[in-house]
Image (spheres, grey):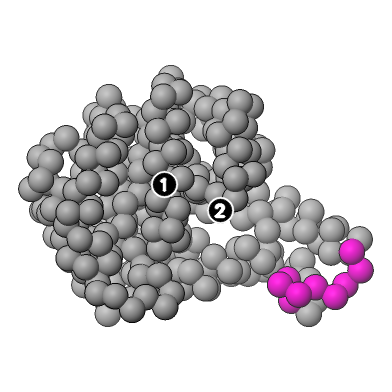
C-alpha cells in the first residue's frame, strides 16, 4: 500500500521517531515492549524516522526503518538529507533502503555538520534531490517533501518558499509533511496560499506535543524560528521556572509541580491543535513523538485518533 493511495481514501495518522544517540536509547526504542511496540498498539498508518542530526546517525536510521519494515505492523518512512553528499552516495543509500523494503522517503536538504570544511557535494536544495530520485528510480519511491507554514527560516519570503514547494511537486513529489507551526491563523493562510499557487499534494500536518517548557521554547526558537502564539505563551508564563527553564534555581519540589502543571495544560493545548487541524482541508496528522510513547499515547486517545489505521 502506498501512502498516496491511503491519502485518497481518508485522513492518515502517523508518528515520527528519531535514531537515539546511545545504545541504551536504541534498545528502549526497538526492544520487545519498547517505544515502537507501544506506538504500534495505536495503529498508525506509518512511522517515519529522522536521518539524525546532519546525517550523523545514518546507520541507526536504517536499523530503525528496517525493524519497522520487518515488524509488518505499519509502514516505514525514512528521512533523507542530501547536503554535502555526492550523487553516487545518495544513490547507494536509496538502493539500500529499497533492498530493505523501504520505499517511502522524506526528501530534505539538511544542514552541514558543524565545523564542516569539505565541499557542499552535488546537491544544494531538496528540489535537486526530488529530481534525482525520480530520474534514477522512477516511481519506485513515494516522495514526501517538507512544507513550512511560516516559511523556511532561511528562505527570503513565504511566497518564494511556496514557489519552491510547487517546484518540488512539478519534479515528482507526492505529498507534504509540514514543519512545526503553532500559529493556526498562519497555518490557514499558508494552506490557502499553497492551493492558490497550484500545490495540490496531500498535506500531512506535523504536530509537536507541548510537554516540557524548556523543550518547547528550544524547539520553537533555536530550531525553527516559530511564532509562539498568545495562548501557548500564556501557558509558559503561568508556569515559568525562575530564572529560566534551562537553569532553574527554584526548589526541586516547586520545579516538579510547575512541570507537571505545564504538561497537563500543554497536552490539552496539543489536543486542541489536533482538533483545529482536522477541521481543515488536510490529509493527515503526523505527531513528533520525541521517542516518548506514553505521553503521545495519552494525547492520541484523548484526541480520538487512536486506531484510525483500521
User: Badge 1 local density, few (<14 within 10 Å), some, or many (20+)?
Assistant: few
User: Badge 2 local density, few (<14 within 10 Å), some, or many (20+)?
Assistant: few
The quadrant of the rendering that contains the N terminus is: top left
Relative to 92, does residue 180 appear above or below in the rendering? Answer: below
Q: Quadrant of residue 26?
A: top right
Query: Residue at left 85%, top 58%?
Result: 257
Residue 41, position in %: x, y?
56, 25
31 in the magenta segment: no
What SS does tag 1 mark? Answer: helix
Relative to 118, does residue 135 appear above or below in the rendering? Answer: above
Q: Which residue is mark 2?
A: 21
Residue 19, position in %: x, y?
50, 48
Relative to 104, does residue 165 appear above or below in the rendering? Answer: below
Query: Residue at left 73%, top 58%?
Result: 262
Q: Nearer the viewer, residue 67 or 126?
A: 67
Confirm whether residue 28 shows in the render.
Answer: yes
Q: How many marks?
A: 2
Query: Residue at left 61%, top 55%?
Result: 210
The quadrant of the rendering that contains the C terminus is: top left
Q: Main secondary structure of the magenta part?
A: loop
Q: Quadrant of residue 61?
A: top left
Q: Nearer the viewer, residue 278 or 163?
A: 163
The answer for how far apart the CA atoms under marks 1 and 2 are is 11 Å
Q: Is residue 216 left or right of residue 9?
A: right
Q: Is residue 66 left or right of residue 198?
A: right
Q: Which residue is mark 1?
A: 59
Residue 69, position in %: x, y?
39, 28
In this picture, which residue range is highlighted in magenta? 244-252
What SS does tag 2 mark? Answer: loop
Residue 180, position in %: x, y?
45, 59
Amino acid at each position: 500500500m502506498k501512502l498516496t493511495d491511503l491519502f485518497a481514501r481518508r485522513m492518515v495518522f502517523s508518528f515520527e521517531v528519531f535514531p537515539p544517540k546511545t545504545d541504551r536509547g536504541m534498545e528502549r526504542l526497538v526492544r520487545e515492549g519498547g517505544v515502537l511496540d507501544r506506538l504500534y498498539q495505536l495503529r498508525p498508518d506509518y512511522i517515519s524516522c529522522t536521518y539524525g542530526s546532519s546525517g550523523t546517525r545514518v546507520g541507526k536510521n536504517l536499523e530503525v526503518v528496517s525493524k519497522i519494515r520487518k515488524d509488518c505492523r505499519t509502514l516505514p518512512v525514512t528521512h533523507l538529507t542530501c547536503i554535502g553528499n555526492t550523487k553516487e552516495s545518495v544513490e547507494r543509500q536509496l538502493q539500500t533502503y529499497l533492498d530493505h523494503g523501504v520505499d517511502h522517503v522524506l526528501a530534505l536538504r539538511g544542514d552541514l555538520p558543524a565545523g564542516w570544511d569539505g565541499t557542499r557535494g552535488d546537491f544544494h536544495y531538496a528540489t535537486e534531490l526530488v529530481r534525482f530520485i525520480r530520474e534514477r528510480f522512477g516511481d519506485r519511491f513515494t516522495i514526501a517533501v517538507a512544507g513550512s507554514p511560516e516559511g523556511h527560516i532561511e528562505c527570503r519570503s513565504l511566497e518564494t518558499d511556496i514557489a519552491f514547494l510547487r517546484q518540488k511537486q512539478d519534479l515528482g513529489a507526492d505529498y507534504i509533511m509540514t514543519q512545526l507551526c503553532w500559529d493556526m491563523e498562519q497555518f490557514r493562510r499558508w494552506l490557502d496560499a499553497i492551493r492558490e499557487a497550484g500545490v495540490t499534494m496531500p498535506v500531512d500536518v506535523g504536530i509537536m506535543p507541548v510537554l516540557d517548557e524548556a523543550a518547547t521554547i528550544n524547539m520553537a526558537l533555536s530550531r525553527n524560528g516559530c511564532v509562539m502564539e498568545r495562548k501557548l505563551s500564556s501557558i509558559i508564563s503561568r508556569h515559568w521556572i525562575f530564572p529560566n527553564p534551562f537553569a532553574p534555581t527554584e526548589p526541586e519540589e516547586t520545579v516538579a509541580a510547575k512541570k507537571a502543571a505545564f504538561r497537563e495544560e500543554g497536552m490539552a493545548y496539543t489536543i486542541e491543535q489536533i482538533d483545529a487541524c482536522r477541521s481543515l482541508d488536510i490529509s493527515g496528522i503526523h505527531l513528533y513523538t520525541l521517542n516518548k510513547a506514553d505521553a503521545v499515547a495519552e494525547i492520541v486517545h484523548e484526541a480520538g485518533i487512536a486506531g484510525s489505521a483500521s
